[in-house]
Image (tube, grey):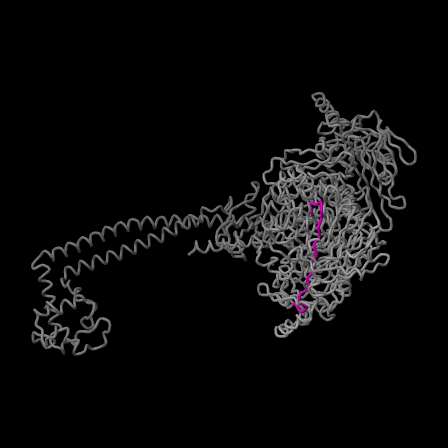
Amino acid sequence: MAAQVALRRQQAQEESEARDLRLLYPCTGIGGEAGIPQGSSISAGVPVSVSSSPAAACFDVFGSENQKDDKRFYRERKSFLCIDGSRMIPFEQVNDDYCDCEDGSDEPGTSACPRGRFYCTNLGFRPHYIPSSRVNDGICDCCDASDEYNSHARCQNTCWNLGQRERAYVEGQMRTLDEGLRLKQQLIEEGVLLWREKQAQLRELQQVAEDLQVKLEEHRRKKHEADRLKEQTLKALEAGDGGLIRHQNSSVASIFHLLDSNKDGSLTVDEIKAKVVLVHDEQRVLSEDEALALLDRGHRMDLSKFQSTLWDVLTRGDTVKIKDTQGAPGSLSSEDPHLKAADRAAEWEATNLKKVEEAYETVNMEISDLQKKLAIDYGTDWEFLFLNGQCYKLKVYEMWGMWTGKPKNHYSQMVYENGEPCWQGGSRSTTVTLTCGTETALRSVKEPSKCQYIMDFQTPVACQPVLKQQGIHSEL
Amino acid sequence: MAPLLVLGLALCLSGTWAVDKGNFKTCEQSAFCKRQRALKPGESPYRALLETMELTNTRLTLQLINDNNKVRLLLELYRLQGNITRVKINELKPLKPRYEVPDVLIREPTTEPLSVLSQDENGVVLSLGVESQRVIISARPFRLDIMEGSDVLMSLNSRGLLAFEHLRMRKDTFSYKVTSTVASTTKEEEEKVEDGMWEETFKSHTDSKPNGPSAVSLDFSLPGVEHVYGIPEHADTLRLKTTDNGDPYRLYNLDVFQYELYNPMALYGSVPVMVAHSAQRTTGIFWLNAAETWVDISSNTAGKTVFGKMLDYVQGSSETPQTDVRWISESGIIDIFIMLGPTPKDVFSQYASLTGTQSFPPLASLGYHQCRWNYNDQEDVKSVDAGFDEHDIPYDFIWLDIEHTDGKRYFTWDPHKFATPKEMLQGLMDKKRKMVAIVDPHIKVDGNYKIHNEIRSRGFYVKNKDGGDYEGWCWPGSASYPDFTRADMRAWWASMFAYDQYEGTMENLYTWNDMNEPSVFNGPEVTMHKDATHGAWEHRDIHNLYGLYVQMATAEGLIQRSGGVERPFVLTRAFFAGSQRLGAVWTGDNAAEWGHLKISIPMCLSMGLVGISFCGADIGGFFKSPSTELLVRWYQAGAYQPFYRAHAHVDTPRREPWLFGPENTALIREAVRQRYTLLPYWYQLFYRAHVTGEPVMRPLWVEYPQDLATFALEDEYLIGKTNLLVHPVVEEGARGVTAYLPGKDEVWFDVHTFQKHNGAQNLYIPVTMSSIPVFQRGGSIIPRKLRVRRSSTCMEHDPYTLYVALNLQRTADGELYIDDGHTFNYEKKEFIYRKLTFANKVLSSVNLAPDAKFTTDSWIERIIVLGASKPSKVTLKTADGQEKQLEFDFDASMSVLTVRKPGMNAGADWTMTFQ
């Protein structure tokens, strides 16, 4: 094995020295006897590399890549070592339509090797390799028709046309690219501006939030103060002259006076009917009997009796009440002006606090929204920022998907998962491919399987300044 | 609330993943089956009236009488060429004609002379001419025994279950009562009217049964037989089970949604042929009846353990093992063909002589088929096609399911998705590939649809019981069904495939007939009402034949459009006896489950035994989504089954071979490539099947008929004679398989490693994800083409490599068949057919068909001799007398000799000497 490797190295070196040897197919004096089956039509025109003629200072072996290093392997000699080094064969067996090398390297010009490949020179167009299985299969694969040298296929050399079309296409692409890149630059600039604007907005909001924070504390303190004051006033009232009972008595008396329309010190059926109504039916005037019942079946009622009977009914407030008032007369308790003022102050401060709290909350929400948006990956130059919030045609998703392009171009593909549910279970998903174009638009939508969508989205920002066609022969 | 909803949904979904058995009848729910099955053995009312016997040279007739009702039957008995006995039983004077199945037999069978050997009042003995075979007709009760020497091969009505419901006038309840009081005086015992005789309701459907009861039934006893096979289509074991404890096997073509494995329910197709096998003999019963049919099987050894059987043997007390079979059909007559073997191959050729052989498919149809419900549009087709090239996976056909049509109107294209079908077809043709588009038999009822209007105006639709055009619900919505039983309808249908009729078609477009049971979504058991009419006949009479006729008309259309030059390719889901003549069959809507992969083997083996060789299952499984492992294993198994097509339901994710990562793409590529290297062998086997009727994919017992170990094997099989043995991996996570290699004096070579194994052993083979255990028998020669290309057509002119596997006697033989691959010119002897023999260290190619003419560009590229010893030289001698020495390689560790580039033309005579 080691010997073989050494031999291989030597061979390669010799070959690089012999790089000037060159012969284009078809060689003169090839074809014929070498290993081609008798009586088989394959013998006609097979470009066997073998030539018994000593004039074979020939050649690039047919089907190998002449332009590159490959040719050094095929320099004519007595023997050929498979490129993988696995085997040495007589040189006549190179391109003799029988596969000797495991790696297919002995048959670059025929279909004999399952792992082989054939080099389409394709002058005027792009050269490329095809699998050996496409040599002489009746289908024109190389535009120079070189792969169908012994088949029924009638292939035309279409490289020139293809090359022209390709060049026109590439030119178009380049124009699109230039325009796209220009637009992209604009969008980037817009994006940057927008980004800065948003950043400024964020900072502003943060400042507002800070101010509000201060205000908030101020208001909290104020409210606290007002509450405390109210409490104190109430306590003072209760503890001070007469206390609650007197206060209550005066209330009882005032209600009694209110009801006692003729001010004769006792309530009558008519007075009751005039001032007292049912809680559930204020419009109806009480009946004689009902009024009488409220007067505890007596036709007159003095203050002391009122206090022990009807007052209780009124303060309970669940059956009858005084006309044009709300609920039980208990609320009438705070007649005290100090208490009233303290109460109003506390209420004022509470409202103020609530307002500030709401404002603070709103600002914070705006901040978090903005921060979320700014945390999205808009590309390296924020070039995708302008797309945020825009909707293109098919509104299924309300969120920003995941960038899933290959590492080389991370921003070339986006996947949306967990869309609306599909009837057979699972949820819809969409893969959006972004390609370079001068407009931002959805170009096509496909559904290769149920509820799995593929969208083609064109936009200038997908334009990459790396697109450069290589390989087209420029000499033609 | 929300969790409750989710639960409800989950239940609903899991409920859809199994067959709804309630949609399909059990025997108990099928009135005639219930009636017939209720009969008790040993009480036959039938008596042969020997005095009525008439014997011409080739035909015996005899009347039978039912002593209960005095109705007379006429029995006809024929001796047919090739060791077949035909027995027909019909009413002597039926009220109106009873249906006799047309168009299944390829011709009126050739009869042979019969003679009476002896006769007395108890019976008649007839000579069957060969091998001391006799038929004994016993008179009381009627019974028929077929003997060879002193052995009974088969007995008919030995259990007295012959039953023939004669046609009768319907009596309403009142008059029935009157007649029954009179009955005692007329002596004729009136049969009592049972439920379901004149009307039968299943679920919401009522069958009006205007002809009343008309069932026929007969029992067969098979002494010495413990193994019976056939009567497809069932998702069941290869060896049929006894049916004592459940329903009989049912033959009634039905569109069964998500069918269940291992049960006797009816499926899409029916072939009423059973093959019985013992170590001594193989026989067959062909019950030619197209009505709903049930088959009961019982066995006197079924319940016995191996130990029990051994005990019987030791004690000498055993009764002979015996299998009893009983056939029950709803209408028609009894018309049976008893195929007497004696070998499995004799039975195949006997059956082929009656119903024909496998059609010879275009070579390309043996390649790989890429299908999906649906490839959405032309661009989709183009990109899938390109995907195969990009990933270097060969394929021959891409398929379009129902969505390609303009609103499920067959013979049309969706004007948006498939606007330029010819452009698409041309694109495929440029790559030497082809397409199949679906054409189903249900026709959209639509006054703007040409096909519908023509069929309606010509009166070609099946009629409902009231005489109007039958309408049912199918893919297009309301649909009618052409009456394919009419020859004029079929001729018209065929003419619709002409290139100027079926617009947008080209010669590389072929056809797929689905839903031809026929499937009627809102019909009883998802099919047509039995009281629908086909001219004089009820659908009841012809049901199982409908699908065959659809495929027949379609195949004829493809032949006609080419002026009779090109072989057709038509895939069908429904089938009957004779469908093998028309194209390919697949096992219908299976599921992406390991069990379904596994059962594809016995299902196709069963079909092969009754003539249908071109069989396959949807690779990957139709319903549900396969795991990657299952998909890869299915590609591997499918590569070694006759019809190789991947298919998927519309609701499943895409599963083109390259969507599962490079490693799995490589595994699938390798499986498909193995298929393509073997195409010359597959093609030659289909040629053989076409000529002889032998199955392409066959159970081991067919080739090892005396090896009891092979009788129930269904996880491995042979492709062609005994040459390739395949034991695919069909278990999840398998680390190895155990293959039985038959043949005491045989050797088998692993086709991948060339390792040699002895026969008559259970061989454990460790497997990895790339393993497809396949063995070539020592003694065989198999041709391959190793230059796998984009499609089979691209490989047409490629050279061959011959794999010569030597047996212990150091001999081998094989064949090589070559023709143009797609026309009927082989019928004009345009082919090459050669015998390859290795003996006495000489390999030779001899012409098997000297009167045939064909030339090929293909040559012999390489010869690989397995089990070889090292020669000192290898000399090739060609027909012109020239000799040349050949280079060779010898691998001593594996005893493999590779002869380098002998180079002779594949059609030439030559000998190669290994000195």
Give the x, y percent position of residue B516: 68, 59
- Looking at the image, which is closer to me, B547 or A221? B547
Task: For the N terminus of chain B, give its image quadrant.
Answer: bottom left
- Looking at the image, which is closer to me, B788 or B553? B553
Quadrant of the rendered structure where residue B834 is?
top right
Give the x, y percent position of residue B529: 65, 65
B259 w.r.t. B877: above or below: below
Answer whether residue B647 is magenta in the image: no
Task: For the C terminus of chain B, give its image quadrant.
Answer: top right
Is residue B530 in sight in this rendering? Answer: yes
Give the x, y percent position of residue B797: 81, 43
Q: Is residue B707 left or right of residue B797?
A: left
What residue is at 24 percent from the left and 74 percent from the top?
A281
- Looking at the image, which is closer to me, B101 or B357? B101
- Looking at the image, which is closer to me, A351 or B820? B820
Give the x, y percent position of residue A54: 86, 28
B176 w.r.t. B68: above or below: below
Q: Is residue A241 left or right of residue B339?
A: left
Q: Which residues are magenta?
A: B209-228
B631 w.r.t. A339: above or below: above
Is residue B427 in sight in this rendering? Answer: no
Q: How many marks?
A: 0
Q: Is residue A24 left or right of residue B11?
A: right
